[in-house]
Amino acid sequence: MPDRNYSERVSNQEFVADIMGRVRDILPLLNSDEIAELLGALTSSVESRISWVEEVKSAREQLVNSIPEINSSMKLGELHSELNRIEMERFLKLPSVPVLHESCTEYRDILAGKALDLVTEEMNTSGLKQPQIPFALISMGSDGREEQTLITDQDYLIVYGDGGGKEADKYFTSFSELLVERLVEVGFKKCTGDIMPSNPTWRGSLSQWKKKLLAIVRYEYEDYAKNLMDLIVLSDTRYVAGDRELAKELVELIRGLEKEYFHALWGMAKAATEMKLALGFLKRIWTEGSGEHKGEFNLKLLAWAPLVMNIRIISINQGIPATSTLERIELLKKEGSFSASMADGLKDAYLILTRYRILQQIKVIKGIQKDSHYINPYLLPADEREHMRQSIIRIEDLQKVIHANFHIV
């Protein structure tokens, strides 16, 4: 499907009707041979594309369905690489951001769950028996938002039930350390920010988590920046594997505390509205003036991340339970925080910016460039560059809304 005019969002039905209307308009201008040739070419193209889509779907499903039978983290890693390759090739032909998000998130959840099972079995084999208490693996970051892309790292926490005492703490320390290493073998890179259950900050019993969370929202820890960053990371928590009810209890606790302690949410809102954007003089796209990235800007830090962050803030404030950015926008429209035009504009901004982030990742995977975050907007066609500029302007408008709503001086 070709790119649409992002300023005029249309439904799939309207889009198909428009294409069919164009074909009907052309047919009266052709003779019988030309009509047969046109319709034959259209039929062949559609059938070929449908066949390719079905082949990709079948290959992906076979790999995903084989995960439960694999008992080696290294073999899971090989399968993970093949799934990533399939998604990359599909995206290059059918660049749908939501499809890639859904697919990558789904198979990585299954892979992480299988890794959890393998580590449990490995611990038992080594003589370290699991305490008779429930536990769960919870994701954060892009995984927590169900927005996985082609390059991923570990953003997980572990929560386990109360009553196990020091023995449970000791067990889950060893469990978490082993899990992180096995996930690396499966293809989940270690988080550069150490947001992994091997870090004691990101694991604990439910009661330990309650104590930590209260300390965070009350800013009892001395490092204000760390308090704020931990709150931001915890805002996108989502169940992945293990005991679902235990995970639900922790996730709901996090949501409730963020809503209850308004000053904590206000701190996140202030940080969100102060995030710099790649806008310069006369709202032109700003780029680096010198250095390694001269003529480029950091697409993640100066456009995509501020959008995701600001949508997150207003969603928490309005009690929106979803973590997906697109779903958050839709629910904010339904409950009246966004007009239809503003919501559609923000959705377009997310899809445009994320599509380019994925394309930059593909360049890194293929060895074309080293960095997946920087992009030169002036190498893009003029219309695409303008779409990008308008996307960043919409983020600036959103920041102004939040700035006013939270009375940030």
Image (cartoon, helix red, strand yellow):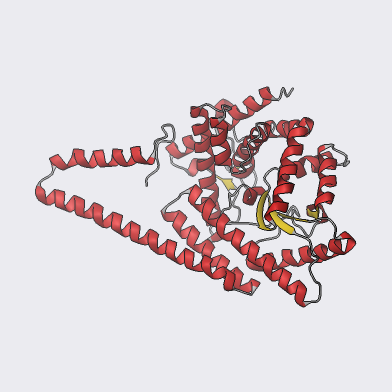
Q: Position of residue 332 (x, y in %)?
A: 57, 32
Front in this rendered view, residue 281 or 364: 364
Q: Position of residue 299 (x, y in %)?
A: 59, 43
Q: Is residue 286 above or below residue 400?
A: below
Q: Residue at x 72, y 69 (%)?
A: 119
Number of marks present in the image shown: 0
Q: Is residue 22 above or below residue 133?
A: above
Is residue 57 rendered to the left or right of residue 276? left
Q: Is residue 369 above or below residue 220?
A: below
Q: Position of residue 382 (x, y in %)?
A: 44, 37
Q: Is residue 53 above or below residue 288?
A: below
Quadrant showing the C terminus: top right
Q: Is residue 364 visible?
A: no
Res. 227 image quadrant: top right
Front in this rendered view, residue 259 or 352: 259
Q: Position of residue 208 (x, y in %)?
A: 84, 50
Q: Residue at x 77, y 72 (%)?
A: 123
Q: Residue at x 48, y 64 (%)?
A: 61
Front in this rendered view, residue 387 or 305: 305
Q: Is residue 106 visible?
A: yes
Res. 396 image quadrant: top right
